[in-house]
Image (cartoon, rainbow, N blue to C red):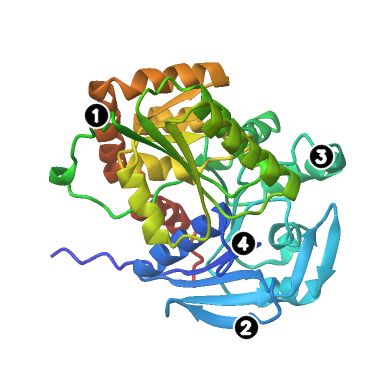
Amino acid sequence: MKTEKKEIKLNILICSEYFYPSIGGAQKVSEELAMNFSRSGHNVTVATSQHIDSLKKSEKFKKKIKILRFKVSGNSVRGFKGDINSYQRFLIESKFDIILLYAAQQWSFDLVLPIIDKVNSNLFFAPCGFSKLNNFFYRDYFKKLPKYLKKFKINILHSKNYRDNKFLSKNKIINKVIIPNASDFPLLKPRKIFSRNIDKKKIKILNVSNLRFAKGQDLAIIIFLFLKIKKKASLFLYGNHTGSKIYLYYLFFLKFLTELLCKNKKIIFIKNTIRSDLVSKFYNSDIFLFTSRIECSPLVLYESASAGLPFVSTNVGNANEISKWTGCGIVKNNLFSIVYSINNLIFKDNKLNKMSISGKKNFIKRYNWKTISNEYLKIFKKFKKKN
């Protein structure tokens, strides 16, 4: 008689510099992992910053996730501020089966390194790109890092080809695995996958990123200016105004220039929108234009694919990989190539439909947070502590 295999339940801690109510890519990944781990029956806690004094030191998020906030900031290069001892003591005294440290170069990861041998939990680390790898001031940081990376159970990377994986390979660190990012859009049943046809009389191009130089909204406007569109066209720029005043003035100058020279084109800035409105825009746009200057593994490209919205992107982060994995994108190295690609796509419904359907099918198959979270859990369960 077969006996049922007992399901392994884990006590998981996610350490992230920022979490709810803060908004950003790392925060989004941490939230999706936490929620999906919890839905699978595991106990989940998040350790993060008390970056606003009014935030509670401890609270429940969506009635499931326990948030513990520490009044700590900085990193090992810039220096730390706050009660670092309380965080380190918490890690040493805690009894978690799994601790997932999300992103390097910030206090919730950097403060673990000096006490790594004292933490009685299985430690996992997601580098999230090593954005400061080529920064002069971080030379010593990255010289010392490899000896610690070898002590983690697994280093979880989002890309085969990005700089963090190359760094690990260069330093002969083999305890690693590739797990992509994903989208949180509603999972559609295959029968609901529909063709996408552009209304040539009113073309809508979408760009989503907080308004700052690194995210390249100026590049998006310049590309939009040079598109050969004879009918009405709109570029929607979604993102909070986090950039400098000079950059914002520059963007509005480009907007004025575009609308002055091309009466048939309209640029709309939209900020502080609710999530449901933004998601609907992905479904109702014709092309997603991504022009960021620096990324690791941009979530918006997965979101674009999940909505069946073909994307055209600069060659940033692992955009090339996401394009191949989802079959929903085109990645180019320069603005002229991007302009050419969009001009071609606009008038090729068959190509757009093929990309759209491929994006949705691959989203359903793998690139959704339920599936990706299970890939994390599969690895975690191999290292569960024996009672």
Label 4 with label 1: CB-CB less than 8 Å: no
The CA span between labels 4 and 1 is 38 Å
Q: What residue does disc 1 label?
A: 353
Q: Which residue does the image show at 81% across and 39% down from the upper left?
A: 143
Q: Secondary structure at mark 2?
A: loop
The CA span between labels 1 and 3 is 48 Å
Q: Is residue 110 left or right of residue 179?
A: right
Screen quadrant of the N terminus: bottom left
In this view, the mark in front (2 or 1): 1
Q: Earlier in the sequence, mark 1 or mark 3?
A: 3
Q: What residue does disc 2 label?
A: 56
Q: Earlier in the sequence, mark 4 or mark 1?
A: 4
Q: Earlier in the sequence, mark 2 or mark 1?
A: 2
In this view, the mark in front (4 or 3): 4
Q: Which residue does the image show at 19% across and 34% down from the upper left?
A: 195
Question: Which label sits on residue 16?
Answer: 4
Name the spot of residue 101 as percent of width and height, x first.
Answer: 61, 58
The residue carrying pointer 3 sits among few (fewer than 14), some (14 to 19) or many (20 or more) residues within 10 Å by Cα, namely few
Q: Which residue does the image show at 71% across and 33% down from the upper left?
A: 171
Name the spot of residue 170 as percent of width and height, x first.
Answer: 69, 29
Question: Which label sits on residue 143?
Answer: 3
Label 2 with label 1: CB-CB less than 8 Å: no
Q: Secondary structure at mark 4?
A: strand
In this view, the mark in front (2 or 3): 2
Given the image, on which type of amino acid does mark 2 rest?
A: Lys
In the image, is residue 80 above or below residue 132?
A: below
